[in-house]
Amino acid sequence: MMVRRYCASLCHVVLLLLFLTSAEICSAVSAAVDEDDDFVHQMLTMRRAFIDRLPPNVLAYFKSSEHAFASGNEVVIINSLNDLEARIGSPGTSPQDRIGYLRVLALYQPGHLHTLLRLGDSLTAINPSEAMHYYEKSFDSAIVGEGKTVVEQYPHIAFVVANLLGRYFMNEQNNQKGIKYAKMAFEISKQGIIPPTMGGNEGDTCSLLTLATSMDTFPASLEAADASIRTMNYYADIYLNHRETTVFDDQLTTQTLPVSMSDPYIHCALTLFPLSFYYREDVAAIASQHYNIVTRAWPKLKEYVAPHILEMNRGDGSCHEDSPDDEPKRINLAVVSGALSSGHFVSEDFGGVLSRLSRELFKVTYVFVHEGVDLPIDPIFEVQTKENGGDDEIIHLYMNDEIDTGNGAWPVRLAEEMGKLRFDIALFLDLTMSRVTRRMAMSRFAPVQLNTHGKYFILIFNNFLSCL
């Protein structure tokens, strides 16, 4: 029994380090110990999970190579590692197999920096969570060794990876980790590794924008909420008051940070949505600060003013032209949203009141800004269209990948299209949720522009809108 227990303990150690011992052998040996030995069960589960990830070709290689790596013979191990690297680099290796071989290499060399970085890069598009797991290890000296972290070995790569990690964790609503890596990216970038138009020695503009617009979505306490706002305001003050480089360089940033290519604004500047939860803060001041930050980064967002607004010089305070027969013209109202689709709480909240809005006073146009999946519009907004005897209109707006990609101020193009329609009032239903309509609203394509934060917390009366 003592021998069996010793073998079981030895099996524990080998499993813990490399999973090298055969699962069947370990199962047989561990049967001699208590059935509730959670350690053995946990290790076997981890081994099975690892094996399940391997493609058939890689699994066959893994099983055949276990004894070589467990032999303790330095020459045999080095030859096996060289063979593994050759398989990874072979042009004939499929992407799926290459990832599998990299996983095996990471198992045998858990602190190998290049392997961690290659796995992160290979997995980012197909398994972001696992990719970030490997990327995080590259910053940990306890794993890769003192003086061998990606920051110390490759600061250019460390900057890009830290920026990616920060944005990923922000998106996952892990504010603590998001702030940690955004700060790291900002500090690393001060080492003279980025051009002056990206911030140079002052630090990367993108990472600073992330820090200056970040709010913890779900703070654990009032103290945590206060701390989150203090951190945001600290970096906002740096950006607005203590920095020479503020205008965002879309071209160089998207080249340096390829993950920002689709829309650098969305990658670098965070949403205002959590602001609705910070009821103890000065909401107007924070929203104004956010506006000042992003319009300083992308000045074009606030430059467009529709021609019919510039032409207005009426003196009577009205914002629309009367009909030629001197009868008052209906108010031309644009209802702008990225969430007019069926079942969305924005359409559920606002659909009823907008459908009951007096068409004697208002000419209503729904402007549906599509921000990804092309969703059908909620039927309630089609009730009074021309096809149903009314004169409401529906306009669908989209990002044009050919001309808008890599341009944080691209929604100005949509505002210019709306400016041609000479709206009197634009009502934005979801500015804190929609990053596209928020940028549209920074331009002026209607004399009066109103907004909500996406939930029905104000009453919209005919008289209220018409008096505006």
Image: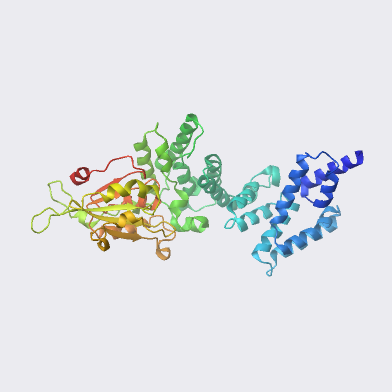
Q: Is residue 101 left or right of residue 273?
A: right
Q: Residue at x 84, y 40 (%)?
A: 33
Picture coordinates of residue 11 (x, y %)? 83, 45
Q: Is residue 394 left or right of residue 264?
A: left
Q: Is 327 or 79 nearer to us in this picture?
A: 327
* Location of residue 423 by image quarter: bottom left
Picture coordinates of residue 452 (x, y %)? 33, 44
Q: Residue furthest bottom?
A: 92
Q: Is 460 or 351 nearer to us in this picture?
A: 351
Picture coordinates of residue 391 (x, y %)? 23, 59
Q: Is residue 7 visible?
A: yes
* Location of residue 389 by image quarter: bottom left
Q: How many marks?
A: 0
* Location of residue 304 by image quarter: bottom left
Up-down: is 282 above or below 23?
above
Q: Is residue 371 left or right of residue 311?
A: right
Picture coordinates of residue 36 (x, y %)? 77, 38
Q: Is 364 or 383 nearer to us in this picture?
A: 383
Up-down: is 280 above or below 22?
above
* Colouring mode (rainbow / by chain / secondary structure / one colour): rainbow
Q: Is 352 or 125 nearer to us in this picture?
A: 352
Quadrant for the N terminus in the image: top right
Q: Residue furthest top?
A: 223
Q: Residue at x 39, y 33 (%)?
A: 279
Q: Residue at x 84, y 54 (%)?
A: 74
Quadrant for the C terminus in the image: top left
Q: Is residue 428 visible?
A: no
